[in-house]
Image: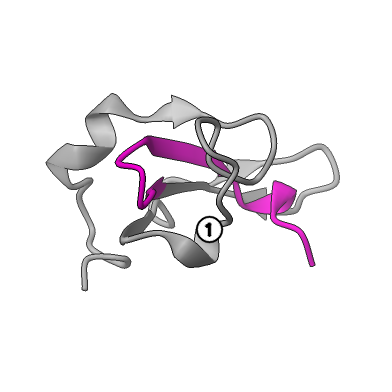
Amino acid sequence: MEAFARSAPEWTYKATHALSFCCPRCGASSRQATKVWLNRYAPVMMENYERKWQEFYTCECEQVWWAWSCDRPN
């Protein structure tokens, strides 16, 4: 599994930013993804000193998308 690989897999380069934490094409959740990569090696510091990072997903519909970790629903 490449979810925690240090460098970004090539498939992440064509990702679209999802404004909601789901596939922007078909609305599938991240749990339905066929591939996952978490960019935990380059976190962004928020105003309240919490970290957020990009999470990349390949959907079953083959859409590649990413969203911020802080936008993940509970």
At x 62%, y 52%, the residue is: 69
Q: Is residue 73 above or below residue 28?
A: below
At x 27%, y 26%, the residue is: 14
Q: Quadrant of residue 16?
A: top left
> What residue is disc 1 on?
30
- In depth, the one of 61 and 2 nearer the eye is 61
The part of the chain drawn in magenta is 57-74
Residue with the most extreme right position: 48
Q: Is residue 65 above or below residue 58?
A: above
The image position of residue 15, as x and y in percent, is 36, 30
Neighbor class of circle 1 (other Cα within 10 Å; few <14, some 14-19, many 20+) is many
> Is 47 a magenta residue?
no
Quarter that holds the N terminus: bottom left
Q: Taking 55 as reference, is 52 left or right?
A: right
The image position of residue 55, as x and y in percent, is 47, 50
Q: Is residue 62 above or below residue 1?
A: above
Q: How is the image coloured?
A: one colour
